[in-house]
Amino acid sequence: MKMKKKLVGLILGTVMTITTLGGTSVMAADDGLTFAIVYPNIFPFFDAIGNGAEDKIEEMGQNITLIKEGAQNGDVSNQIQIMEDLINQKVDGIAIGPCDSEALTPYIDKAVDAGIPVLCFDTDAPDSKRFGYVGTDNYEAGRAMGEELGKALDGKGSVICETGVVSQAGLIARLEGVEDVLKENYPDIEIVQTTAHGGDTTKGLSDIENMITSYPDFDALIQVDAAGEAGVTAFKSHGWTKEDKVLIVFDDLEPVINGVRDGQVYSTVTQGQKNWGAAAVEELYALTQGEEIPENTDTGFVIVNSDNVDELYPE
């Protein structure tokens, strides 16, 4: 596995107040470290990443303060401003899920040039100076979704698709993975329409309902971002289960897992995102100590369906 190494000087600051996403204030003590996690969108899916980071900090027993920030509705300019602010604050490390990898690359580079190590999670920015990536191989996860779709439809049918922020490289890679599998293995399955809610999950539900109206005889709905709750809501409103229409989504928010149990969701591709936060903190700390980290930490994915949901997510 390719490794990266760079000595990073510790920034020893005075006591300061940091406001996190939740609006609470914490104190960063003298000689401590301050790390930031920057989400691509403010959405419940990303809460687990912050929780994983906090748990890892407690486990490590290090004097680390964590800042959690996120872009409103996946707004690129908002995420750029967050990065600028963190650079000006001279934090000791940043983990970011870029909502637009190309647009954020100059700001990732700016942080690294300022002596602040940066990792990417969820979505990579491979052309930047970031030290590493933590998360799922999104293309392979998309291929897994494509295989699930092929099996569920027995190789034939029409599909409607909802995604999130159109500039987010991870979501683009997932959809490419789905499309490549269909082209290679299931040529009689066609994605007839794809819409993008742009980080507004309310719009996501509206998009889905509009596609259902346009294609009432569709066979399957796939959602390649983390907003699978919208699909569950739509299926419930129409009284559908997986015996009527196929719904395949990403991730493990509670409404999705309940949808698997209740029969609306055929399967969901889960990523164990809590592990991203833990790995990000551990690797940022290693970088501040001049240690090596992997350039790519692939946390994998798991297909959850009615056969294993109770085992993986016991009530």
Image: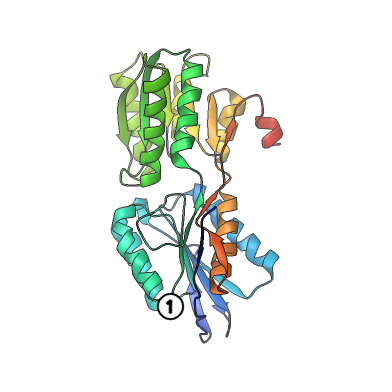
Amino acid on which the number 1 mark rests in the picture:
Lys
196 vs 27: above or below: above
Q: Observer-nearest residue: 185 or 281?
A: 185
Q: How many marks?
A: 1
Q: Position of residue 130 (x, y in %)?
A: 42, 62
**134 sits to left or right of 196:** right
Asked whether residue 228 is in view, the answer is no
Q: Position of residue 262 (x, y in %)?
A: 60, 25
Q: Which residue is mark 1?
A: 90
Q: Observer-nearest residue: 301 or 305?
A: 301
Quadrant in the rendering for residue 184: top left
Secondary structure found at label 1: loop
261 vs 13: above or below: above
Q: Position of residue 240 (x, y in %)?
A: 49, 18
Few, some or many residues within 10 Å of mark 1 (<14, 14–19, 20+): some
132 vs 160: above or below: below
Q: Residue at x 51, y 17 (%)?
A: 151
90 vs 60: above or below: below
